[in-house]
Image (spheres, coloured by chain):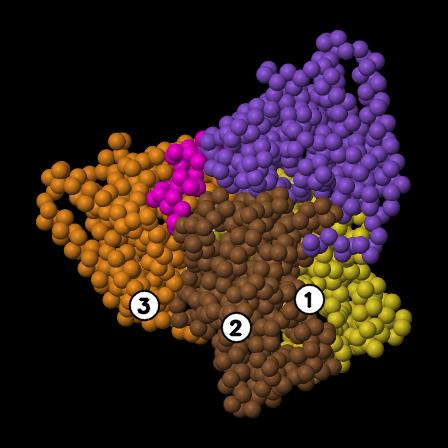
Chain colours: A purple, B orange, C yellow, D brown
Amino acid sequence: MKHQPDMKTLLHWHEQMWTIRYFEDNAISSFRKGHFTGSTHPCIGQEAIAVGAGAALKPTDQVLATYRGHGHALARGLDPKRLMAELLCKETGCSGGRGGSMHLCDVSKDFWGTNAVVAAHIPIAGGVALSNKLKKNGRVTAVFFGDGATCEGAFFETLNMATLWKVPLVFVCENNGFAISVPTHMAIPIENIAQRAQGFGLPGVTVDGNDPRHVHEAVSAAAEHARRGGGPTLVECKTTRWERHSAISAGKYENEDEAMKWKKVDPIPRFEKFLKDHGVKAAKLDEQRERAKKLNDEALEFAMKSDHPKTETAGDFVFA
Amino acid sequence: MKHQPDMKTLLHWHEQMWTIRYFEDNAISSFRKGHFTGSTHPCIGQEAIAVGAGAALKPTDQVLATYRGHGHALARGLDPKRLMAELLCKETGCSGGRGGSMHLCDVSKDFWGTNAVVAAHIPIAGGVALSNKLKKNGRVTAVFFGDGATCEGAFFETLNMATLWKVPLVFVCENNGFAISVPTHMAIPIENIAQRAQGFGLPGVTVDGNDPRHVHEAVSAAAEHARRGGGPTLVECKTTRWERHSAISAGKYENEDEAMKWKKVDPIPRFEKFLKDHGVKAAKLDEQRERAKKLNDEALEFAMKSDHPKTETAGDFVFA
Amino acid sequence: MSTRQLSMAEAINEAIRHEMRRDPNIILLGQDIGNYGGTFGVYKGLFDEFGPERVRDGPLCEAATAGFGVGLAISGMPTIVEIEFMDFMTLASDAMCNQAAKMRYFFGGQVKVPMIIRTPIVNRLGLGAQHSQSLEAWMMHIPGLRVIIPSNAADAKGLLLTAIREGNPTVFVEHVRLYPSKSPVDDADTPIPLGKLRVAREGKDVTIATYSGMVKPSLDAAINLANDGIECEVLDLRTLAPLDREGICASVKKTGRLVVAHEAVKTAGAGAEIAQTAMEGAFDYLQAPILRVASKDLPIPTGKLQDLVYPNSADVETAVRKVME
Amino acid sequence: MSTRQLSMAEAINEAIRHEMRRDPNIILLGQDIGNYGGTFGVYKGLFDEFGPERVRDGPLCEAATAGFGVGLAISGMPTIVEIEFMDFMTLASDAMCNQAAKMRYFFGGQVKVPMIIRTPIVNRLGLGAQHSQSLEAWMMHIPGLRVIIPSNAADAKGLLLTAIREGNPTVFVEHVRLYPSKSPVDDADTPIPLGKLRVAREGKDVTIATYSGMVKPSLDAAINLANDGIECEVLDLRTLAPLDREGICASVKKTGRLVVAHEAVKTAGAGAEIAQTAMEGAFDYLQAPILRVASKDLPIPTGKLQDLVYPNSADVETAVRKVME
Ligand SMILES: Cc1ncc(C[n+]2csc(CCOP(=O)(O)OP(=O)(O)O)c2C)c(N)n1
Ligand SMILES: Cc1ncc(C[n+]2csc(CCOP(=O)(O)OP(=O)(O)O)c2C)c(N)n1
Ligand SMILES: [Mg+2]
Ligand SMILES: [Mg+2]
């Protein structure tokens, strides 16, 4: 690999993955306890993508993601407190409690938000990337989306336009095998989603999305390519979805085994094994995990204690 | 070539091309004289595609096309009288005078109409093709569209869905180098539109669209492939547009030379040369041309003499 | 004729099942409609009975899904497309509004477009601004479309039967909160005509014209108001296109007062058309201004703020009291 | 301050040119907007002055074009997207209505979306059902959008200046028949506030509330009616969101009568909202039912049948005489 992170970085990734995992665990249990309504779409099992790709970006780059984007927000350095508060629709939430689980945003971190219309954020990311090009600011935009999104017109149109205009954009597809209940083979007639790129003339690569090092490698290369003016790249990260689409909808898998498939390829134990093989002590890993847990428990407490937005503010933020 | 038409067929094509040419000439002059309003989008210079592709289809197959689809209607055997009457929005028009130049239709000829929203008819054609598959009726659907349409989401989504479901559909792209004023290189980042197919796993071929024999060859192969259950093919026919987009809008070409480019590659003289090289007498060709002209002059006369739809019928045909 | 208690979801399922048994050409298109049974489970069992060719689960592409629906429909295969949330009608709107709705017309009657989009209003669930909209007014504004928007199981079944048999482009608007609510439904095959409202409660003092999710809150308000001697006539419009203009005016002529209630945002919602219908047809009978109860003109927030944005039974009550002043 | 006679197309061009000179971040997106100058030539000369980076001609993909516009806008680059015919707003409607309109709200005010879609109503030209629609009511129904719909050059310029400077998601609805019509326009840089109607003609007997393509026919009707002693007050609403509800009610309170005129089809059009505005705010003053003059509820045909479908000056006159009875 060209981009070899040092051990300190790798350890940081380990802690980040746990931070995301615990965040999602808390999200699910809070939802189940009725602390918020709507739904929430955990990225459990997909943490390696958020972390590996996130690490390939500079703080000045921009990120846009989907409703399954809590991990991307955390990897981007958003405060878990304010994120959890947003899930609970509290005033202190990162979006002022108006957006909820599917509309997380922190512009100060150049996290330009998560979106609830599948693929609709992809052309928006194209526009953000185009602004970088026009401003010649050297920034790169990364947009995350699922396999399902790669059947939507907005995705294809953006592949075309972004490639044509050579905008500094990295398309990161998290192919977790399902769009709600529809398996990829019932939606996509090609083997690898990266192959989509061939119809548009941009590079496309497929990587193991459950290893943050591979994701990091591919997204780093794509970001560099974009920064050099080479235009966009489509990076497909193969992964496995958590047992269900969201905290409400069951995945309706054929059997329990299928539902728990993600556990067999869980990126966290796998990465822990890698770290241990490279000499990291179990105690170190435990310590990081504990810290991640504590961080999230505090976040949940903060969110629980926060107030709901005042009703008289319901009309705020419609127009500038 | 695998599909070698006999001389009789070739001569028929010759006459068809002239029929289309004269039809369009009359359309333009009628429009200029104010015999109808709106606009009209001639397929002058693109006749070889309508004729070559049309000949590759069976009478029971279905055709859908765009506003630049007069040629496809004629090649499909629609009556020039009723077509011209439709342009003039007369009661006797093929669509009862409601549709005009952009909405020609004759279901009895399995010509399922021309459409004025770029690319919107492509998924509709997909549905028609799917109905063939479900009915197992052995029919194939051909859908015609321009280069511009190959940037629209509806086109891409249909490539995906049609390939996935292996519907008997032939995508025929008439790449005439322009979408109104936008040249293909300012819209499409790849060399050949046929390459789009690679992102979806269907076959894609590029042919000389100004030679009906090449178009016929490619569309025949695609139709056979579809009929055999192999699914769709994308056939790109490279051609050159008439001097302008429509009878009103100037193409705003850089210069006169550019505007008249189509004349240099006009498929008709080229095909006539081919026929002469193969022993056809000039007199025979002239005779065919005259007949085509006469047919169209009669069509125009018919259209001119026809009545406008009665005002009390304006509300007809909204609901079944 | 026997009746059973069915939920609205079951009634819709029953109507579709019934029609699919009758007509082997009927096709279902959408996402998650196969074994999964539809996003909200409305298609339970249909995949098992009719198989993957007729219950066609597929890729996430609303525009092409609706476009394929139009193509199937004109080919003599009546098609029902599920759009998972009404908010995503944006993506299917070209196929539905520029194609399905107009095609029969601009082809001079040569084609028939038996295509139905079923789509649910999914509001008050806290899913946020992109998953909470009621866009029936958009569809009502497109000539060539039927817009059906039932509030209960029996109406849903009867109207859907009619829509399928009539074979015109139809937007069938469901409501996620109404899916589980049960009411008696005929065993028999009784289509309900389009454009005929249902008097959900008779009354002489004021007319409440409403539909879908606001029927129940309006009836609740009517009960409370009756305690104070105000007798509301509650009209469940059931179809917005065609709109039962006569029925609305007849009621308003009787009561002299009208309140219109819906969950869509107020401005340029269906309520304006309903109100103006009474204005044009019953002006001389009006004893008070027509008032509207509707969502506030805001993108819909999540969380507690929703309570402020959506209308409720108390809002209907307030409006009625106001027109009774 | 000097004024010149400008066509509406020139006035729009001037406003955009002026703003692009002032703010180097402003970007134009669309198809045929480069050297070609826009489908209807509104951008004449802008490509030459500002070049291909800022006047970005591109591929035919309305959805992504509008989506890119949103992305540029939130990145501090105010963007004007041209949608070639208003009928194709269907394709841009997700980007505009589910994204641009709501994004500032659901992100708690963190982003600003200075994005304008310019789109023309292209009716009465005989282009048929897919090229003749007036869909402003759709846009008016989406909280978070500005809807501007001028009838003359001066208003077009002043309102567009305001829209660009305000920096909110805006649908700027032009009208192809009005592009060439000339009227005096200020040299000066005078933005016109949104939500303030213009009294196009004063009168005491009846109010005609109208906009865009129906202003001129309404004024023509008013002249005819004045000959018979009927004095019409013609209101050019200019913006539909915000709607000048106060201004409408003030006029109706004066005249006691209201006719609403627009070219969109009648059912669920903006006219219903405008009428209901007077109902809610001026009921006690109404001496006659509010009537609407609008297109018939049909897909728009080509040819002579159009004359029957679109409203004209005579229809306005008839409606006014009716409310004066
Ligand atoms: C345009 C649109 N259609 C449908 C939905 C409903 N929906 C929400 S998530 C989802 C599945 C998306 O699958 P994928 O893109 O693979 O992402 P994943 O959920 O697997 O991360 C669907 C269909 C939606 N939100 N937006
Ligand atoms: C969705 C949509 N956008 C824009 C237009 C306006 N328009 C009509 S034809 C055309 C160009 C299409 O180009 P192409 O697909 O190459 O077909 P051609 O006209 O060259 O045959 C455009 C932009 C339209 N009719 N539909
Ligand atoms: Mg997925
Ligand atoms: Mg072209």
Secondary structure, mark 2, is helix
User: Which x, y percent locates residue A34?
Assistant: 84, 42
Give the CA distance from mark 3 to mark 2: 25 Å
Residue C91 numbered tag:
none
- Same chain assignment for discs 3 and 1: no
Quick one: A26 or C118, which is closer to the camera?
A26
Mark 3: few/some/many CA within 10 Å (<14, 14-19, 20+): few
Q: Looking at the image, is B113 positioned above or below residue A81?
A: below
Identify which residue, B156 or B135, lies in the foreground: B156
Q: Quadrant of residue B215?
A: top left
Instruction: Kindly identify which residue carries mark 3.
Output: B34
Q: Which residue is mark 1?
A: C271
Quadrant assignment for the N terminus of chain B: top left
What residue is shown with label 2?
A: D214
The kind of secondary structure element at disc 3 is: loop
Crowding near the residue tagged with mark 2, few <14, some 14–19, many ≥20 C-alpha atoms within 10 Å: many
Instruction: Residue D131: tell me if it is visible.
Output: yes
CB contact under 8 Å: marks 3 and 2: no
